[in-house]
Amino acid sequence: MAERPPSVPRLAWLGWEEEDEGTEDAPAWQLDEVEEVQLLQADPDWKLPEEQEHAQALFHSSAQKFWESLKPSEREDATIAAVEGMADSDSYNAEACAAMLDVLVESDTSRLQHVPSIVRCIYRWLMSNTHVSAEHRLDNSLLELTHAHPHDVAVTLLRCAPSCDRAAATMWRVMVSRSRTAEQVLRELVCVLEDWPLHSTCTSDGDSSDVFALAATRVLQEILRLPGCPQRLNVLFPRIFLALLSQIFFATQQMPEEVDTFWRGCQQEGCPPTNPSRFAMLTVKALLCRLEYDDVVFEVERKRGWDTLLSAETYHCAMGLLARQLHGISRSLCYWIAGHLVKLLRRKKQLWEVPAMAFLVELLVYPNVRCWGDNILQLVPMYLQSKCRVMRRLVLRGLLALCKTPLMVRRMRPLLRRLIDLLTDADMEVVGMTLSVLSKVLRATGIPIATSITLQLAESLWPLFDSDANHVQLLSMHLFRDVMEFVVGEGKKPLKQHVHRSLIPLLCHLYDENQRVAEASQETLLQATKFLKNRKLQQLLEREKTWVVAKCLLAEYSSRVDEYLQQCLLYLQSPQASMRVAAIRFLGLAGRHVAHQQVKLQVIYEALQSTTKDVSDSVSSVAIQTLFLLRAAERNPPSRFSLPVLQERFHRAWRRRPSLWDIGFLCCWSSVQS
C-alpha cells in the first residue's frame, strides 16, 4: 500500500474493503470492541487543506466503502456512534464523522430511527465548532433530515435550544434556506405557536416533554431577520399572525411559573429585555414589515393600537383596529384570515374567543369574507348564549354584516328562537341589534313564520315599547307592526290577545316627547286597528282624533276595561310629563265606565290623588281637575232618560240589530212554513 500523505487522515486513505477478513463476522458496531473504530481518531498534526472539496470527496468515498462493508442492521448504529463523537474533536476526526452522516442520510432518510439523537449531535457539534466551514459542513445532511422528518428535527431542536442560541440559529437558518423544507419547518413552528403556554407532542424516540410556545416565537423572530425570508411565509401568514396575536393576549392574562422561569433564562442568554407579551408584539410588527405591510404597522402605531394590544381590558378593541387596517391591504388575505378564525372559534378556545370574534366581525365588511357565512352561522347558537356581554354584541354585529347577503338572511331562520330570547337581555345595545336582525329576517324571507314563534316574538316586543332607549322603542314598534302585517291564516287568532295588550302602551306613546317614537306609535296603532278589523278606530286614527280614540276604545272593548286600567296606572310613573298627563286623562275616561264598581273607582281615585302633588304643575293640575269631575259625576249620576244616556243606549241597540238580510230571510221562512 502506498504511503499515506501526511495531509490526509488515515480514515480517508485506507479503504474499508481492505480490512481484515474477520470484519464481516464481527459483532454489531461497538466503540470499545471493534478495532476499526480507532481509525476515527483524529491525527493531532492534521489541518484542513486548501483543497477542501477534494478532501471531503475522499472522506465521502472512504465512508461509502466502509458503509457498504457493514451489515444493514449495523449501519445506523455505526453512524450514530460516529456522529456522537463529532463533538469530541480531541478523540475523533469531525470530517470523518460528517462523511459517515452524509452516507447515512443519502442511503434512506425515511427509515431512520434515531433522528432526534442525530439532531442533538449536530447541535452539540456546532456548539463546539465556531469555524465558518464547520458550521456549514452538515447543511445538506440537515436539509435531508428535515425534509424526511420535519417534526422530529424541529421539535428536538426547540427542546435542545429553546432560547435559540448561536448553534441553533445556524441550524434554523439552514432549514429555512430551501423552499421545500422552509414550509415544513414553519408549519411545525406554527403548531407550537398556537398552544399556550406549552405544546404537548412526542418525537420518534418517545420523548414527550412539552415545548414552550415562546421558544417557537424566538425562532420565528430569528427567521424574520434573515435577508432572504422564506417565500412560504406568505402562505402561512394567517396562522402565524393569529398565533402571535393569541400569544400577546395570553401573556397579558396569565404567566405560568414555568414560562416565567424560561423567559428569565432567555434574557440571561441575550434575548431582548422585554416581557413575553411585548416580545410577541414586536414579532408581529416584524412579520408585517417583512411582508411589506409597513402601512398597517404605522397606522396602528399612530392610533396607539399597539399599546392597547398589551392591555387585557382593551385587547379586543385593538384587534378590531388591526383588522380594519388590514382591509386596505389585501382582500384575499382577509379571506384566509377569516377562514382560520372560524376554525379557531370552532375549537372554543377559552379567553381568546372574544378577540378572535372581534377580528372576524371587522373582516365581514368584505363580500368575499362573507362567503364563510354558513360556517359562521354554525357558531352563532353557541356564542349567542355567552355570558360575556361583549361577545353577544360582537355576534350580533356579525349577523348584521351577514344580513347584507340575502342568502345568509334566509338561512338565519333557524336562529329566530335564540334571537327572541335575547330580547329580555339587560343590555339595550344587545336588544337593539337583535331587533334589527329579527326585522331583516322577517322582511327578507317571505315565508310564513310558525305560530309559536310569532306569539313568542309578539309577547317579547310590546314590553319594549317602554324602553329607556329610543332606538329600542322605535325598532320594537316597527317590528310589532311587521308581525301583525305578515302573520297569516290561523296565526291571527292567537295573536289578537297580544295586540289588545299593546293598545294602551301605543295610545300613551302617541304623546311621547320624542316625535319619532310618537309617529311610530301612531303607525303601529293604526296597523293594530286594521288587524283587529275595527273600522271606527282606524278612521279616528287616520283623522288624528286621538282622544276620541281613547273614548272609543273603552266603548268598543268594554270587557277589557280592567286590563286597560291596570296598564294605564303604570304610566303615571313615566319620566315624561306628557305621558303622565295622557294616563291621567285615560283614567278619567275609564272612571266613568266603572262608576258602578266602587272598588275599581277607588283605585282610580287613589292613583289620581297621588299625582296631585306631581313635580310638574301641568300634571298635578290635570289630576286635580280629573279627580274633581269624577267625584262630581259620582255625586250626580246621569238620569236614566237623559239625552246622553238615551243616545248611548240607542247606539248599542243599533249595533246589535239583526241585518236586513236576516229579517228578510226570517219572513220568507215563516211564510213558507205557513
Image (tube, rainbow, N blue to C red):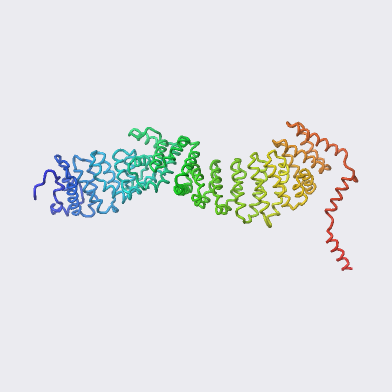
Q: Quadrant of residue 269?
A: top left
Q: In which quarter of the image is residue 129?
A: top left
Question: In this rendering, is residue 184 above or below 575?
Answer: below
Q: In which quarter of the image is residue 280?
A: top left
Taking the view exactly as shown, the residue that stands out farthest to the left is 2
Taking the view exactly as shown, the residue that stands out farthest to the right is 641
* 92 lies left or right of 633: left
Question: In this rendering, is residue 304 above or below 526?
Answer: above
* 41 lies left or right of 251: left
Q: How many labels does the image show?
A: 0
* Between 66 and 222, the one nearer to me in the picture: 222
* 281 lies left or right of 622: left
Visible residue check, residue 122? yes
Quadrant where the image shows the C terminus: bottom right
Residue 66 location, x and y as percent? 18, 52
Visible residue check, residue 343? no
Residue 640 location, x and y as percent? 90, 45
* Between 518 and 329, the one nearer to me in the picture: 329
Q: Residue at x 78, y 43 (%)?
A: 547
Residue 545 location, x and y as percent? 77, 44
Residue 327 location, x and y as percent? 47, 44
